[in-house]
Amino acid sequence: MERTRGIPLHAKILIGLVLGAICGSIGQALWAKDDTFVWTVANVMEPIGTIFMRMLFMIVVPLLFSALVMGVMEIGDARKVGRVGLLSLLMTLLLSGIAVGIGITAVNLVKPGEGIDHSKVSTAMPSSAAKDAEKAAAKAKESREKKPADYVLEMVPTNPVKSAAEAMDGGLFALMFFGIVFGLAMSKVDAEKSLPVKQFLEGLFAVSQQVIEFALRMAPYGVFALGFKTTALLGLDALGALGKYAILVLVALAFHQFVVYSLAILTIAKRSPLEFFRQIRTVMVTAFATSSSNATLPTALKVAEEEVGLPRDISSFVLTVGATANQNGTALFEGITVLFLAQFYGIHLEVGQQVTVMFLSILAGVGTAGVPGGSWPLIAIVLLNIGVPVEGIGLCIGIDRILDMSRTVLNVTGDITIAACVTKLMGGKVQDVPEEALA
Ligand code: ASP
């Protein structure tokens, strides 16, 4: 995130949240029933917050489509690279699945979003959030009435343009399905013929990232308004829940980083986890500092070859594809955030809906741009699809910087872990690895 007038943007966003929450809580304590205060919340704070959120929504379809098609196309190319591609794909699915599983279990055990007075939420919630809550109830009812075959059929679109138009309203899976088919088809077509489409998608992806950048510049004001509105309705309970959520995310990320990756390194790559983490420390620090997998890629490539001793052909392929397509930290974070917000708004998600969140979070790991805050548009769309009020993300964005820095460390560590495992599975052609690095 860039600096604006001396103060870094992420600090401005945090200041926006804290100020908004303080003003909203004071307002709630003093004028909860005052007409002018209620009017200000509904006619000033809510619209400002909504405009900020819509800046994120408007870019979801182009961003998701371009990122997914390019990710799948690269994985499709991977099949040409043969076993390396297949092994990386399997490892990606395995590690992302475990990551989301950890996130979802943790949030169900700790329930950081519970303890909020939901009677206040539903009676005091202004229009848009109340509508979302109604939608959630309708969705839950609908999902109880569906046959299993209906879910499968809904995923295959008859008209992808229609699915895109309905992406915020249940069309997401169908659009993703189309993206996957399109990406696979692109990897089969003669490279010269598909080049203009590829260049167009690359351009679309870059422009979409710029729109996220614009939205983030508005974030301090949007987050102020959303923080104000939420605490004006709920008081400081909201901030307590937010604190618990942040700690839970950090603990779950640390578990995946140090337990799951260590086990993979020890049992599959047959290396010493301690030594491995020591070798990649520069990569972890760079990821933490930049909050961006893409920005960390050059360092990751250098370290994988020079410090970890992985063969260049394997590591460059796995790391380049992984920077976009393998984001375990992000997948884990998205699962926790969606379920936390459902708890926060008192929305009960059926098992089927939780499974949907799991799938969407794994896919979102593929579709998320490796840039700071890249996960937010996808979280917004997952929330919309399962009917949880999206404005809740305004609160979470307020404290996102530290969570973003931390999940990015997992995203890149995951890529190098996969590269090390795939190297071993391919027959362990490892170059100049120091003796003590091998378990
Ligand atoms: N910042 C993350 C990355 O670049 C993406 C995200 O989760 O927001 O890997």
Image (cartoon, rainbow, N blue to C red):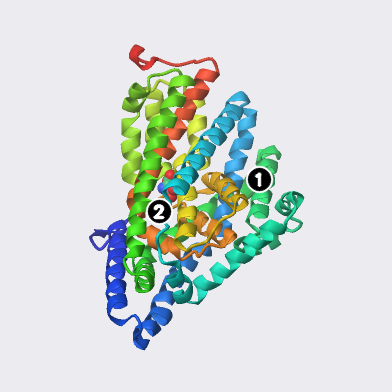
Q: Secondary structure at mark 2?
A: loop
Q: Quadrant of the C terminus?
A: top left
Q: Is residue 312 above or below residue 158?
A: above
* Residue, far bottom: 35
Question: Residue 409 or 387: which is nearer the viewer?
Answer: 387
Q: Is residue 423 visible?
A: yes
Residues under labels 1 and 2: Cα distance? 35 Å
Give x and y (percent) for residue 86: 61, 29
Q: Are marks 1 and 2 in contact (CB under 8 Å)?
A: no
Give x and y (percent) for residue 228: 34, 71
394 relative position to 360: left or right: left
23 relative position to 332: left or right: left
Q: Please tell me the numbered disc located at residue 112.
A: 2
Q: Please tell me the numbered disc located at residue 146.
A: none
Q: Residues within 10 Å of mark 1 (few under 14, many from 20)?
A: many
The amino acid at mark 1 is Ile
Of discs 1 and 2, which sits in the foreground? Answer: 2
Residue plotted at (58% across, 64% down): 136
The amino acid at mark 2 is Pro
Place residue 175 in its image quadrant: bottom right
The residue where tag 1 is placed is: 180
Question: Residue 394 or 420: which is nearer the viewer?
Answer: 394
Give x and y (percent) for residue 155: 70, 51
Give x and y (percent) for residue 403: 36, 49
Place residue 137 in its image quadrant: bottom right
Q: Secondary structure at mark 1?
A: helix
